[in-house]
Image (cartoon, rainbow, N blue to C red):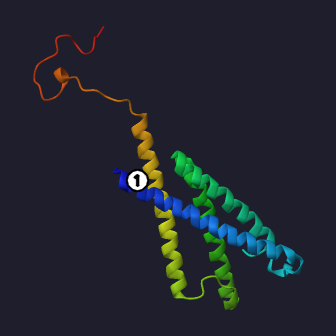
Amino acid sequence: MEPKFVHFIKFNGYLIVALVCYSSFLRTVEWLALLQTWYGYPSQQGWLRRDHPIVAGVLLLGWITVAAFLYQGLNLEVEAFVLPIGYLFALEVLIVTVQDVISTWNNDADERFLRDGQDVVMWAVAVVYFYYTLYILRRLFRSRQRAADLPSVTVIPEYSTTTTRKPIYPLAVVQ
């Protein structure tokens, strides 16, 4: 693969890391403010809500961890380090989808994350961009790993396919 494409693909990976770190910083500030009054959180809404203080804290810790994994995966070009952020993002998408479906069933439009059609389209574009970038990163790392695993082959001119001369000695000995 050409180096300019490799740099572009890795740039997209670093862009995801930067966005995750930025949003994690903002969520940390919100979470610390939420911890000041977490006892006032209505318990009837339960643990399944994304904005519950304990759920938000666990997911925040997860996002910080997977951002570090992705950053190291980009630097070391390790395919396995790309997977955790995809799993956590899938969990977040599932939580948001379930929360929106439940809010829609309860006619509680103020609690929905995706309020109108434009939000759904933008969310879908972000999800496709995210997973396509992870897919391309995995393919890049896999192809580079395969290229690094292959031994270097030197072609001896007298055994190349362009000449029709037979070798002086046999290539394989059958006993």
Describe residue 47's horizontal placement relative to residue 129 as left or right: right
Residue, far left: 164
Describe residue 1's horizontal placement relative to residue 10 as left or right: left
Choose top left, top right, bottom left or bottom right for residue 71: bottom right
- Which residue does the image show at 80% across and 80% down from the upper left? 45
In the image, is residue 112 above or below residue 146? below
> What amino acid is at disc 1?
Val
Describe residue 148's horizontal placement relative to residue 168 as left or right: right
- Which residue does the image show at 67% across and 87% down from the upper left? 105
In the image, is residue 27 above or below residue 150? below
User: Residue 111's x, y, as percent?
Assistant: 70, 86
In the image, is residue 75 above or below residue 21? above
Q: Crowding near pointer 1: few (<14 within 10 Å), some, many (20+)?
A: some
User: Residue 16's x, y, as percent?
Assistant: 54, 63
The quarter in which the C terminus is drawn is: top left
User: Residue 161's x, y, as percent?
Assistant: 16, 28
User: Residue 93's x, y, as percent?
Assistant: 61, 71
Name the foreground residue: 175 vs 9. Answer: 9
Q: Is residue 48 visible?
A: no
Q: Is residue 64 visible?
A: yes
Residue beneath disc 1: 6
Q: Secondary structure at mark 1?
A: helix
Name the foreground residue: 19 vs 93. Answer: 19
- Which residue does the image show at 56% across and 88% down from the upper left? 116
